[in-house]
Image: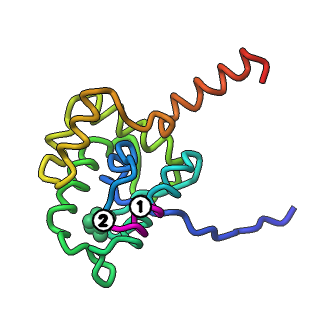
Amino acid sequence: MEKTNLLIPLTTLRPHHALCTLFFEGKGYSQGFVENMWAVVGDPGQMVQIRPGCDVLCQACPHNENGLCDDEAKVARFDQCVLSHIGSRIEIAEPIPLSSLCQVVYDTILREDLLEKVCGECEWAALCQDKWQRGDFNRMLLSSNLLNTREQNRYNGS
Ligand code: SF4
């Protein structure tokens, strides 16, 4: 059979935004930003790729100035820090389900108690750190949670 090379554009996420999705609870920089966030957070199975620079979340953000964050130096540090922790497990631009990306970030950063070290300078840091202390985050974004749900459904016969 003839091989087809369909070029399907992948959703791009800057590395530190995996953390933002895990703690998102409906707050953000504008109504448009919040709606866009919900759309991304609501689809854990979607294929994404990580790349530094403006991404699918930045595209609806009022801080995006012609494709560059108006606090780029700071957010680029967050990205680099995330990459330094997950780098051996995920390649830049590698297609990966959002849930697998979030699982790696969970395993290598959150469970290692590195949240403050990675993005403690962020204006939302207190909110995320408080949620982490309370175990309140978007567990449905973790691939282990998806597996558990599938296992439970199988067990329940649904
Ligand atoms: S603040 Fe900057 S990095 Fe964060 S979503 Fe907006 S443009 Fe992107």
Q: Is residue 103 left or right of residue 43?
A: left
Residue 135 image-quadrant placement: top left
Q: Position of residue 109 (x, y in %)?
A: 27, 36
Q: Nearer the viewer, residue 129 or 100?
A: 129
What residue is at 48 percent from the left and 55 percent from the top? Answer: 38
Residue furthest to the bottom: 66
Kind of residue at badge 2: Tyr
Quadrant of the image containing the C terminus: top right
Q: Position of residue 39 (x, y in %)?
A: 53, 58
Kind of residue at badge 1: Val
Q: Which SS does the magenta portion mostly show?
A: helix
Label at residue 34: 1
Secondary element at image label 1: helix
Q: Which residue is mark 2?
A: 29
Q: Nearer the viewer, residue 82 or 93?
A: 82
Does residue 89 show up magenta in the picture?
A: no
Q: Position of residue 138 (x, y in %)?
A: 43, 38
Q: Is residue 10 left or right of residue 125?
A: right
The region drawn magenta spans 29-36
